[in-house]
Amino acid sequence: MAELPGFARQTDSGLLLFLRVTPNAGRDAIEGSQARADGSVVLRVRVLVVPDKGRANAAVMALIAKALGVPKSSIALVSGDTGRLKTVSVSGCADDLVARALTLAR
């Protein structure tokens, strides 16, 4: 199996992805990985939607699902409901998900 990008961790049911989300951005985009000052690595995600009543979270889930080629129902928000730093769980075959996550790291 390929090495995991820094923003991902393998679980029994798939992957955990660590995100830094910018809502109310000029476009929907996944901008690749970013090393933070504390040494952690996150996947930068921008969405057009404003953070109102979970709409930005839903847009993030849809964008990640589309990028990984999985149904939206396989993506779940684990933490960071109201913050910019979020953790999402992606259910599925870990080997396939790792290969797809590597393409997001650009």
Image (cartoon, grey):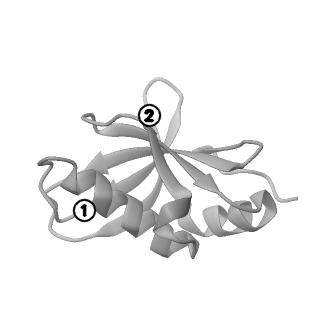
Residue at screen point 24% across, 62% down: 47
In the image, residue 94 above or below residue 35: below
Residue situated in front as seen by the camera: 22 or 36 = 22
* Label 1: which secondary element: loop
Residue situated in front as seen by the camera: 32 or 57 = 57
Crowding at dot 2, Cα within 10 Å, few <14 / some 14-19 / many 20+, comes out as: few
Question: Mark 1 or mark 2, which has the lower sequence index?
Answer: 2
Whether residue 99 sits left or right of residue 23 in the image: it is right
Res. 50 image quadrant: bottom left
Residue 11 picture location, percent across and down: 73, 42
Residue at screen point 76% across, 57% down: 94
Residue at screen point 59% across, 54% down: 90
Q: Is residue 106 visible?
A: no
Q: Which quarter of the rendered picture does the N terminus lie within?
A: bottom right
Q: Is residue 17 visible?
A: yes
Q: Which quarter of the rendered picture does the C terminus lie within?
A: bottom right
Residue 45 picture location, percent across and down: 36, 57
Whether residue 67 sits left or right of residue 6 in the image: it is left
Residue situated in front as seen by the camera: 57 or 3 = 57
Tag 1: amino acid: Val
Whether residue 104 sits left or right of residue 19 in the image: it is right
Residue 84 picture location, percent across and down: 29, 39
Crowding at dot 1, Cα within 10 Å, few <14 / some 14-19 / many 20+, comes out as: many
* Label 2: which secondary element: loop
In the image as oriented, which residue stretches furthest toward the top?
A: 38
The label number, if any, that marks residue 36 in the structure image? 2
Tag 2: amino acid: Arg
Residue 88 picture location, percent across and down: 49, 46
In the image as oriented, which residue stretches furthest toward the front?
A: 73
Residue beneath disc 1: 47
